[in-house]
Image (cartoon, helix red, strand yellow):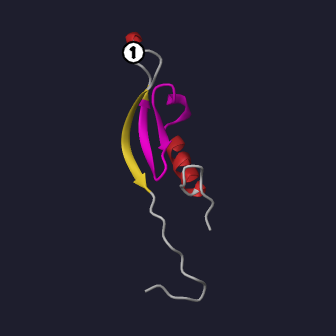
Amino acid sequence: MTPMAGSGLPELDVARVQRWCTAQVPERLRGEIRVECDIAARHLTICECRPPWHDDLGPEWTRFPIARLHHTKTEQSEPGRSCR
């Protein structure tokens, strides 16, 4: 059985998506743009994040969702039993 994150998603899958997000932007550019993963109970949302472009906007980065990955739990077959 795959360990589940506190969100109910498989921990290994969440970690893979988080590593993928981090790898999308070179470290030298992470002050200008980031790719991050928001975790919900049954899905992950990959977001492009940008710093405030105007002082009036405050310190919060802008988050633009670019993809949502849904998790569907499947049953695993018993050893020696074929799937039909």
Q: Which residue is label 1 attached to? A: 57
Q: Is residue 75 above or below residue 29?
A: below
Q: Nearest the camera: 66 or 5?
A: 5
Q: Residues within 10 Å of mark 1 (few under 14, many from 20)?
A: few
Residue 24 in sight in this render: no
Query: Which percent across, then down, holds residue 50?
Result: 42, 27
Q: Residue at x 55, y 51 (%)?
A: 14
Q: Nearest the camera: 50 or 7?
A: 7
In the image: residue 4, left or right of residue 60: right
Q: How many marks?
A: 1
Q: Residue at x 58, y 83 (%)?
A: 78
Q: Residue at x 52, y 36 (%)?
A: 26
Q: Is residue 79 above or below residue 2?
A: below
What is the magenta range?
A: 24-49
Image quarter hosting the C terminus: bottom left
Which of the 4 quarters of the picture holds residue 45?
Answer: top left
Q: Secondary structure at mark 1?
A: helix
**Residue 25 lies in the magenta-colored region:** yes
Query: Which percent across, then down, holds residue 82?
Result: 51, 88
Q: Nearest the camera: 65 or 7?
A: 7
**Residue 68 lies in the magenta-colored region:** no
Query: Which percent across, then down, holds residue 18?
Result: 54, 46
Q: Is residue 68 above or below residue 48?
A: below
Image quarter hosting the N terminus: bottom right
In the image: residue 55, left or right of residue 11: left
Residue 73 in sight in this render: yes
Q: Is residue 41 above or below residue 61?
A: below
Q: Residue at x 42, y 53 (%)?
A: 69
Which of the 4 quarters of the picture holds residue 77?
Answer: bottom right
